[in-house]
Image: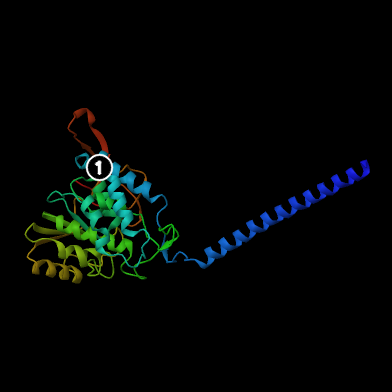
């Protein structure tokens, strides 16, 4: 009897172990099959569209919100009533889960309304092909504002974004270039923002152009030439001052009497604007440049060895007198 009982127990243990092994094998097989099916669904599902330009800026939400809060609290506290969270939401909803070649002005309209603000008269500064120089100038001279110095431009400057119909709705890998499709998120945004910036201009406005560009300082296909110039209001804008700048040591392809400037003047005259044009605007100076160092040219990456005359400048507080060195940025003429 004891032998028979031991044999029965052994059989029971064997059956139990076999059952456990079979159950584990079934579980492993189920997991493998589920994984294969999920992977196949992902492969067969919609793929993220591929484009030729860089994708959406990483941490776009944090970048936009950070810039918005900085602008309305530190730079222009009078705009402290702006709701940065609503502004971000309106930007996000303009492109998320959308084909990036089918963006419309209506998509951005809520954003434009939320982020718009008045531009003081005589402060609007437009530009074309002088990106680096014009923004270095407005950074040190608070008398003028470019589009990139407004809330909309400040938030969007040098960042990119686009959506995609497939999850997660934002394409961080690539976005379409303008050559791939006109109605992409970036192009539509900047066209709308530029139009609104021009419409808000009043008094005397300035435009900084690059006279060293071989094709001509004024281009009719540029944002300024195709959008901003035609949205200036003659009833609000009294005059347009053209600043024609040239590269130091580079070609002076065009002056204020050049062919493209004549075309620009003709367009402005037809719209009843008063016009002035100045070659190498004399007030485009950098206030402090120390001697004996190599300084990078503000606009186009040319390094200069500066030799300047010393001048004492009197400040509001006599104790703040400092020995400074002044040069004219574009003409290398020592200021008197």
Q: Where in the figure is residue 307, as x and y percent of width and height?
A: 31, 47
Image position of 236 with respect to 77: above or below: below
Q: Is residue 303 left or right of residue 275?
A: right
The extreme front residue here reads 1
Can residue 331 be seen here?
no
User: Badge 1, how many Cα within 10 Å: few under 14, some, many 20+?
Assistant: some
In the rendered image, which quarter contains the C terminus? top left
Residue 2 to residue 162: above or below: above
- At 31% from the left and 45% from the top, the residue drawn is 67
Q: In this view, does 169 lie to the left or right of 224?
A: right
Q: State the scheme by which the image is colored.
A: rainbow
Task: In this rendered view, identify the residue nearer to me: 196 or 47.
Answer: 47
Q: Which of 286 and 21 is in front in this view?
A: 21
| Left or right: 169 in relation to 79 | right
Q: Quadrant of the rendered structure where residue 204 is?
A: bottom left
Task: Indicate the position of residue 166 as horizontal and vertical percent values.
Answer: 43, 62
Residue in front for this viewpoint, 83 or 322: 83
Dot 1: element: helix
Point 16% across, 56% down: residue: 206
Q: In which quarter of the image is residue 164?
A: bottom left
Q: Can residue 89 be seen here?
A: yes
Q: How many labels were placed on the picture?
A: 1
- Of the 4 image quadrants, the one containing the N terminus is top right
Q: Quadrant of residue 22?
A: bottom right
Identify the residue position indicated by label 1 in the image. 72
Where is residue 21 drawn, in percent x and y?
Answer: 75, 52
Rendering coords of residue 182 (x, y %): 31, 69
């Amino acid at each position: 009897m004891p032998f028979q009982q031991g044999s029965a127990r052994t059989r029971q243990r064997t059956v139990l172990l076999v059952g456990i092994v079979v159950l584990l094998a079934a579980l492993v097989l189920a997991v493998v099959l589920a994984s294969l099916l999920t992977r196949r669904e992902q492969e067969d599902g919609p793929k993220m569209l591929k484009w030729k330009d860089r994708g959406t800026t990483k941490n776009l939400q944090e970048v936009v919100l950070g810039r918005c809060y900085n602008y309305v609290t530190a730079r222009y506290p009078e705009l402290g009533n702006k709701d940065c969270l609503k502004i971000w939401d309106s930007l996000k909803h303009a492109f998320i889960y959308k084909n990036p070649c089918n963006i419309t002005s209506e998509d951005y309209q809520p954003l434009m309304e939320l982020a718009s603000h008045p531009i003081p008269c005589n402060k609007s500064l437009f530009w074309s092909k002088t990106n680096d120089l014009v923004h270095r100038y407005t950074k040190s001279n608070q008398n003028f504002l470019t589009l990139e110095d407004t809330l909309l431009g400040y938030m969007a400057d040098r960042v990119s974004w686009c959506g995609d119909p497939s999850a997660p709705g934002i394409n961080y890998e690539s976005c379409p270039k303008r050559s791939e499709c006109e109605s992409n998120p970036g192009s539509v945004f900047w066209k709308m923002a530029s139009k609104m910036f021009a419409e808000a201009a009043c008094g005397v406005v300035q435009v900084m152009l690059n006279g060293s560009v071989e094709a001509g300082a004024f281009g009719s296909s540029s944002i300024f030439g195709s959008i901003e110039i035609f949205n200036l209001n003659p009833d609000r804008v009294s005059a347009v001052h053209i600043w024609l700048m040239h590269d130091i040591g580079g070609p002076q392809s065009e002056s204020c009497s050049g062919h493209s400037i004549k075309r620009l003047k003709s367009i402005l005259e037809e719209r009843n604007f008063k016009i002035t044009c100045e070659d190498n605007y004399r007030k485009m100076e950098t206030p402090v440049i120390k001697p004996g160092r190599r300084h990078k040219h503000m606009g186009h990456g040319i390094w200069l060895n500066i030799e300047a005359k010393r001048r004492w400048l009197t400040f509001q507080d006599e104790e703040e007198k400092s020995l400074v060195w002044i040069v004219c940025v574009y003409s290398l003429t020592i200021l008197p």
